[in-house]
Image: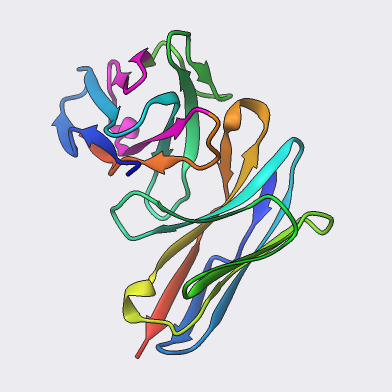
Amino acid sequence: GQNIDQPTEMTATEGAIVQINCTYQTSGFNGLFWYQQHAGEAPTFLSYNVLDGLEEKGRFSSFLSRSKGYSYLLLKELQMKDSASYLCAVGLRQGGKLIFGQGTELSVKP
Amino acid sequence: GAVVSQHPSRVICKSGTSVKIECRSLDFQATTMFWYRQFPKQSLMLMATSNEGSKATYEQGVEKDKFLINHASLTLSTLTVTSAHPEDSSFYICSARATLAHEQYFGPGTRLTVT
């Protein structure tokens, strides 16, 4: 079966750095995705990692270690608008499906 | 690019009626579309995978006769919730994936309320 774990909620301060961790156990792994979702809205794509290492995209970076079944999303220079739910999702080779973790609710405080 | 639309954005219907939700990829061809359901404070749960021109593949526990999916073209998939009940009230989100692409692009979602 598939199992994805991420913290339920986190709090950070505006301007700071926060790291959201995600661990997974799965078969047929085909990449690790991070999505951002604001309340009442659909998820928006942030990053995709299929090989080990760090991918940087502006203020957001994502890391993957396939041997450890571990990923993290790093958000730098936090802004109030970064308050949202961050969803870790594992891509499966079977049918290109995504299996989502429960999401991490990030609150950015002034 | 990669815009996905959904219609309607909100719908209220009476118990026992059917509701159709449309999902369209506006600027790319989507070989595969996915339908998710999300309850408050919970994550997205995959309901079914829809491939153009073939029958949808449903996840375990999802009733295919209740949630009818049609993917008649490379830019349109529809989800019909038949004989809706209050427990079907949820946020329904579709996503679309272009051929050979990895990422899925999500529609804005449809808030269904069954009274």
Q: Which secondary structure class fits the magenta region best?
A: strand
Above/below status of B40 relative to A1 = below
| Residue B59 visible, this orientation | yes
**In the visual, does A65 lie left or right of B52?**
right
Q: In this orientation, which residue lies closer to the viewer: B14 or A69?
A: A69
**In the visual, does A53 lie left or right of A35?**
right
Q: Which residues are magenta?
A: B70-99
Residue drawn at the location 45% of the way across and 51% of the way down: B42
Residue A6: where, in percent of width, then height?
61, 62
Residue drawn at the location 28% of the way across and 29% of the way down: B24
Residue at the right extreme?
Answer: A67
Residue B32: where, in percent of width, then height?
47, 25
Q: How is the image coloured?
A: rainbow
Residue A82: where, in percent of width, then height?
38, 73
| Magenta-span inclusion, residue B95 | yes
Residue drawn at the location 55% of the way across and 31% of the way down: B100
Above/below status of B20 relative to A17 = above
| Residue A1 visible, this orientation | no
Query: Quadrant of the image for the C terminus of chain A?
Result: bottom left
Give the number of marks.
Answer: 0
Residue B112: where, in percent of width, then height?
24, 35
**In the visual, does A78 lie left or right of B80?**
right
Query: Quadrant of the image for the N terminus of chain A?
Result: top right
